[in-house]
Amino acid sequence: MTLRSLSPALAALLLPGALHAAPVFLENVSESGGWYDCNKKTKWTWGTKPHPTNPLNPPVSARPNEWLYLPYDQNICWAAAASNVLQWWQDTRSDLKSATPNGKSATYDVMPQVAQLAIYQTISTNWTNSGGSVEQAYNWWINGGMLDTTAYPSLSTTTASGGYWKELGLTVPQSSSGGAVDNPLFSAYSFWDGDTRSGVYQKLTNSINNNWGTTLTVGEEGRGHAITMWGYDTDEDDNLVIYLTDSDDYAVGMFRQKVVVNDYTDENGLSHCDIYLTSMDGENDVYSYNYEEAGLTGIRLGEIQSFTAPLGDLRIPEPGAGILFLGGSFLALSRRRRAGR
């Protein structure tokens, strides 16, 4: 067992820079469950196993046969991040129809390393393996069809109908200007040089406080990859710390990142705001881009997307305090660090 597989809040008790406030999570999410971490089949190192009929022959891949029948998915991180949010949201809906894909995928038990969801496999088999956006996935799942790709860019396309929740009437209006439009299903915000540390922190925490399923766009320059955010906390220096899952990190589990904001005005009077995610002190790096100007290793944050569809009426009780206490006692006896990727 590693810290990666344990409660982040409990793990924090053992690590430098321990958090000083109780984490805030989305509805039904806690350190121990309620979140999802759907991974791509192409982002797992499967390793090898002995030849099944002749141990003298070279080893064969440890990938299960089911792996071969799933579509290649190396470019659809947006689908994985959106699937995490959609499954979390469907967990609250007592009006879920039996025909709506839900829960674990059919291959989950033979491929637990990637923890794929039925929602994700529905999207991955109906959309092409190309870059896309969580907004397109949300709209297809809820309303059906594709949105205008000028307003919501997507190289991935589909001809499948989707529309598993049309009856909710969460329609996204057509854009007359080619830009994104206000709608009841989702919202998005692109961080820019006019932002400030407090403003960035407010955007991130407000999405969680409003119980909006939250995804982030990250990358070496703040774009190109989608991940899922589940909650937040602050460290002893009042830095925001966020709880995440990532389809490409070669692990199943929630992890945390410190949000470092470098907002300043240069000698020409121009404002700048660079936002980085970096691992907590004492924890192995999840992201490995080196930013000499900030003196850290991590990844840049460029955008936040919020899934604003109303939650249903189903709630999951919080784990008992006794369980958390026992977990903390166990951790205190076994000082371990979070596993690497």
Image (cartoon, grey):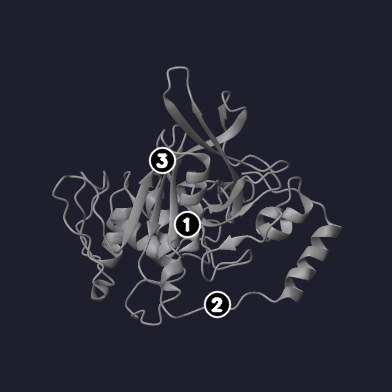
Label annotation for residue 191? 3
Examine the rendered structure and indicate whether residue 265 appears above or below residue 250.
above
The crowd level at tag 1 (other Cα within 10 Å; few <14, some 14-19, many 20+) is: few
Q: Secondary structure at mark 1?
A: helix
In the image, residue 170 above or below residue 9 = below
Q: Which mark is residue 172?
A: none
Q: Label 2 to label 1, Cα distance in Å?
A: 22 Å
Q: Nearer the viewer, mark 2 or mark 3?
A: 3
Dots 3, 1 in contact, CB < 8 A: no
Instruction: Return the x and y of residue 60 as percentages of the image width and height.
Output: 55, 48
Q: Secondary structure at mark 2?
A: loop
Name the residue: 33% across, 59% down: 186
Q: Quadrant of the N terminus?
A: bottom right
Question: Which is in the foreground here, disc 2 or disc 1?
Answer: 1
Q: Position of residue 133 (x, y in %)?
A: 33, 49
Q: Residues within 10 Å of mark 2 (few under 14, many from 20)?
A: few
Q: Residue at x 65, y 46 (%)?
A: 238
Amino acid at the residue labelled 2: Ile
Judging by the rendered image, the residue that carries numbered circle 1 is 206
> What is the three-letter code of the residue carrying label 1?
Asn
Residue 306 image position (x, y, % from top left): 39, 57
Residue, disc 2: 316
In this rendered view, identify the residue nearer to me: 240 or 138: 240
Outermost residue toward the front in this view: 269
Q: Residue at x 83, y 56 (%)?
A: 334
Is 301 located above or below residue 269 in the figure?
below
Q: Earlier in the sequence, mark 2 or mark 3?
A: 3
Coordinates of residue 156 in the picture (x, y in percent): 27, 47
